[in-house]
Image (spheres, rainbow, N blue to C red):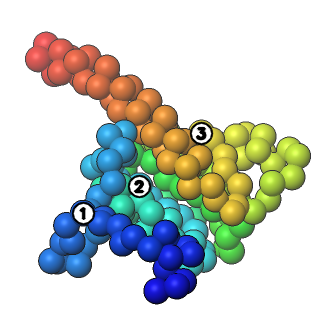
Amino acid sequence: KRMREQVGGGKKRRRGKARDDGLKTPRKLPELAGSKILIVDDDIRNIYSLTSVLESYDVQVMHAERGRDGILILEQTPGIDAALIDIMMPEMDGYETMKQIRAQPALAAVPLIAVTAKAMKGDRQKCLDAGASDYIAKPVDIELLLALLGVWIGKNRSRSATAMPTLTQSAAE
């Protein structure tokens, strides 16, 4: 009790009604809600931590532990809104992964965010040159990541929405 008084002022705080199903209530971030994000990272700990955060914002997360597998998922899964690509991976690194994704017209518009422990001068530009839409250094600042995803998913959805009437009109003609 004494510890509680020192740390929390002695009052118990209500955090809202608990859910019976054991699931966390999704947080609200309209730009991300309902989106599909692919994480490509060879470290399962990174996949787990990013997935935990993103799922709490009502995001459907898919993952691959190798660049080649990430490309296959993008090719075979319609509607992926963005991909987080680790740079330092075995076999095919993130630079090559992004170059191969950008080489495919059907995937070229998918926002790719490079996630890397390499935060030296010039690394950001190297990621952008390889095809990244943006760049974030590890350890990942979650607020910054959420902001980047919100911007890029919003841009991608806007682009898709403006392209739809053109496709519909040409199909009708």
Q: Amino acid at mark 3?
A: Ser
**Relative height, residue 2 to residue 128 (above, below):** below
Which residue sits at x=39%, y=70%? 11
> SS for tag 2?
strand
Which residue sits at x=38%, y=26%? 159
Say which residue label 3 marks: 133
Say if mark 3 contacts mark 2, CB within 8 Å: no
- For residue 36, side relative to residue 148 (left or right): left
Which mark's residue is nearer the viewer, 1 or 3?
Answer: 1
Gap between marks 3 and 2, in whole Å? 14 Å
Gap between marks 1 and 3, in whole Å? 38 Å
- For residue 17, side relative to residue 131 (left or right): left
Q: Amino acid at mark 1?
A: Gly
Q: Which mark is first along the chain, 1 or 2?
A: 1
Say which residue label 2 marks: 37
Q: Which mark is first along the chain, 3 or 1?
A: 1
Say which residue label 1 marks: 16
**Relative height, residue 65 to residue 77 (above, below):** below
